[in-house]
Image (spheres, rainbow, N blue to C red):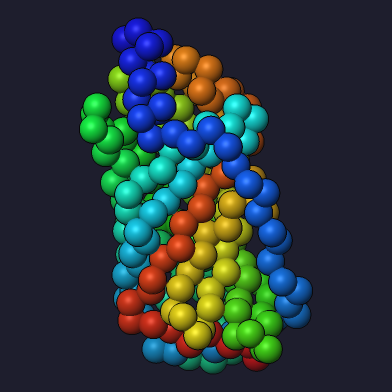
């Protein structure tokens, strides 16, 4: 495919500027967790954003959905406290469809710290990889250039709103195996992924 097709595809969904994101608030490191009710969950976001911070290109997807499970009860370790079995993205634009596909499922939800004042937990989603495909452009978004899914994104969960936020900073994602793409994304460039998901049913997560 011609490079112009890739440029048109990404440009149709691109906003070529990124504002710096603030870091998460201070929180105390946690050893054990309590989750209620736990069990099967669904997550819905009205927007998901994927960016190359070196070139400034940004892909805005209209929606994203995830599903998975959370462990339930008290005395739980934060590592692997949840599992994400499915993740989908709607990135259609008027000139054609941009396919963003989850790889390495199930992803692992890990919690590391808790702020009792705000009821917000902080952690990561690991074992993550995304694949981007559109006419004239393909790329992997991962922690390294390895075919093994090893990307990490920082997340926070707020009890008050029942929302899981995938934070644009604090992760390990980069662009790899870039083919075509008209210079809109570059091999080895840092990648940022962000979205805010409403969790159903809402969970209460505390530590200890």
The image position of residue 5, as x and y in percent, is 33, 15
State how many labels appear.
0
The image position of residue 13, as x and y in percent, is 38, 35
Q: Residue at x 35, y 8 (%)?
A: 2
Screen quadrant of the C terminus = bottom right
The image position of residue 202, as x and y in percent, is 39, 82
The part of the image, by quadrant, that contains residue 7 is top left
Residue 129 shows up from this direction: no
111 lies left or right of 3: right
Screen quadrant of the N terminus = top left
Q: Residue at x 41, y 27 (%)?
A: 11
Residue 185 shows up from this direction: yes
180 lies left or right of 54: left
The image position of residue 171, as x and y in percent, is 63, 50
Residue reaching furthest top? 2
Q: Is residue 192 above or below residue 125?
A: above
Q: Residue at x 53, y 25 (%)?
A: 185
The part of the image, by quadrant, that contains residue 69 is bottom left
Q: Is residue 4 above or below residue 19?
A: above
The part of the image, by quadrant, that contains residue 206 is bottom right
Front-most of residues 71 and 58: 58
Front-most of residues 68 and 19: 19
Q: Is residue 188 above or below residue 119?
A: above
Front-most of residues 20 and 109: 20
115 lies left or right of 15: right
Front-most of residues 12 and 186: 12
Q: Residue at x 43, y 83 (%)?
A: 203
């Amino acid at each position: 495919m011609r490079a112009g097709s890739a440029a048109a595809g990404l440009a149709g969904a691109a906003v070529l500027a990124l504002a710096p994101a603030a870091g998460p608030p201070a929180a105390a490191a946690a050893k054990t967790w309590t989750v209620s009710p736990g069990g099967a969950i669904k997550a819905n976001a009205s927007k998901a954003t994927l960016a190359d911070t070196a070139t400034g290109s940004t892909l805005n997807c209209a929606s994203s959905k995830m599903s998975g499970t959370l462990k339930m009860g008290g005395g739980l370790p934060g590592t692997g406290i949840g599992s994400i079995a499915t993740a989908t993205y709607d990135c259609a634009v008027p000139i054609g469809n941009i396919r963003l596909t989850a790889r390495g499922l199930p992803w692992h939800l890990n919690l590391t710290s808790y702020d009792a004042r705000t009821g917000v937990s902080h952690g990561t989603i690991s074992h993550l990889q995304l694949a981007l495909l559109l006419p004239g452009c393909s790329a992997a978004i991962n922690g390294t250039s390895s075919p093994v899914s090893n990307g990490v994104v920082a997340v926070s969960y707020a009890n008050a709103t029942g929302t899981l936020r995938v934070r644009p900073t604090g992760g390990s994602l980069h662009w790899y195996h870039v083919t075509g793409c008209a210079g809109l994304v570059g091999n080895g460039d840092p990648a940022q992924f962000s979205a805010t998901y409403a969790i159903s049913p809402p969970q209460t997560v505390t530590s200890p």
